[in-house]
Image (spheres, rainbow, N blue to C red):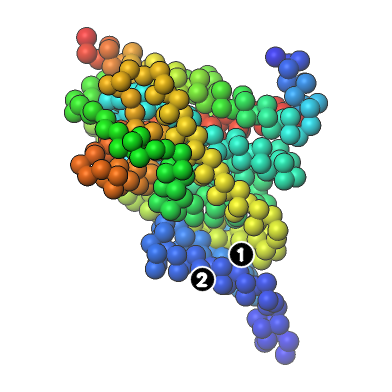
Amino acid sequence: MDAFLDSLRAAGTLGQAAGLAAFGMGGVFVTLFLFFLLIVVLERLSKK
Amino acid sequence: MDEVFAGFTAVGYRQFIMYAIGGVLIWLAVKKEYEPMLLLPIGFGAILTNLPLSFAVGTVEEPGFLRILLDAGIMTELFPILIFIAVGAMIDFGPLFKNPLMIFFGAAAQLGIFATILLAVALGFDLKVASAIGIIGAADGPTSIYVAKRFAVQYLGPISVAAYSYMSLVPIIQPPVIRLLTTKKERTMRMEYREEPVPRLLKILFPILVTMISGFVAPISVPLVGSLMFGNLIRESGVLERLSQTAQNELAYLVTLLLGITIGSTMSAEAFLRRETLLILGMGLAAFVFDTAGGVLFAKLLNLFLPRDRKVNPMIGACGISAFPMSARVIQKMAQEEERGNIILMQAVGANVAGQLGSIVAGGMVLALVPLLAG
């Protein structure tokens, strides 16, 4: 992970922005997917 | 004798341009009713701060009330956090709980943030400033202020004005983008909605667990997510009705009042009248267009995999931006115009509250990742 971040840092501002976009959008989708799972699980638990 | 006329001699044409800009913001608020609670105080603050010698702002040694408010409310990040508590108390996640799939539109419609960061970097801004500009695409004033204060405090004025202005212009910005990306048949798609009660346990545990998940994924996002969810927990607990009402009304109005005039105080002629301001306003508009396109295109992509009876009207995707409830209203109005009796409001509201979550999570991602990449 550190090596990958180092390569992004060395890639110039546009490369850093591309890395930020990829990681950022990925992070938002993963986090909201966790929220989605949370809603589904809590709903099932609440109905039991 | 010069001191008697100091007010006349200390003013230049740049100050008069700022009075005109302040006047336009007040006109938009009063005449057009575009975000009046913010644009009016911002406009008046812009006039106040550009008056000769500007005693309302003062100096570092002898601060005026606007500088005191700026230092106490924006530089400490207190005002955005208090606004989030109020917003959290206003949000009903019920429509999202009834259709959890809508949460993914709250993610897809953050595309504008990251696309605009790339655009800003391509135009020559460094990564930190580009990130603060891109966050206009969160369509969420407090998040924009929070990130701008961290990464580009010198552009706080234009970024805040762009964020709040474009939020009020959602009814003008979104429909043409949606029409461009969808067919008539897609826009007239109907969606089934079942009215079911939401279990109380879900309503109470959701804000607590969302805060904890956010804390593990992006610890730096906790002030944003935590304050929003604290407000929501007060609302949903069912035992703090007075506190909930206070957060939704008195707290929201008081902080909004102070926030607006304080943002206006950052719009001095020296800080505002430069080429970058025009670029920021242009990129802010692009961010809202990319957001809308991201949500709509993701809905179309999702429809390729959904069974026939569960397909979504792609217009719903555009509600994944955080401008709540403006975006949901716009989409419902469009659905009605395309076909009378087509009701997709509750799904739109579900996507819209997901946009609130998506925007603060995206803000947290930007806050966490930019220092790692830019150093």
Q: Callout 2: 10 Å neighbours few (<14), some, many (20+)?
A: some
Residue, disc 2: B23
Chain identity of mark 1: B
Residue type at mark 1: give it: Val
Residue denoted by label 1:
B57
- Decide which of tag 2 and tag 1 comes sooner along the chain: 2
Place of residue B16 in the rendered image (x, y in percent of width and height, measured from the top left) = 62, 75
* Residue B151 locus on image (x, y percent): 66, 41
Q: Is residue B249 above or below residue B26?
A: above
Q: Quadrant of residue B247?
A: top left
In depth, the one of B146 and B335 nearer the eye is B335
Q: Amino acid at mark 2?
A: Gly
In the image, residue B275 lies at what x, y percent? 70, 58
Task: Give the quadrant of residue B127.
Answer: top right
The residue drawn where x is 37% and y is 28% is: B102
Q: Quadrant of the C terminus of chain B?
A: top right
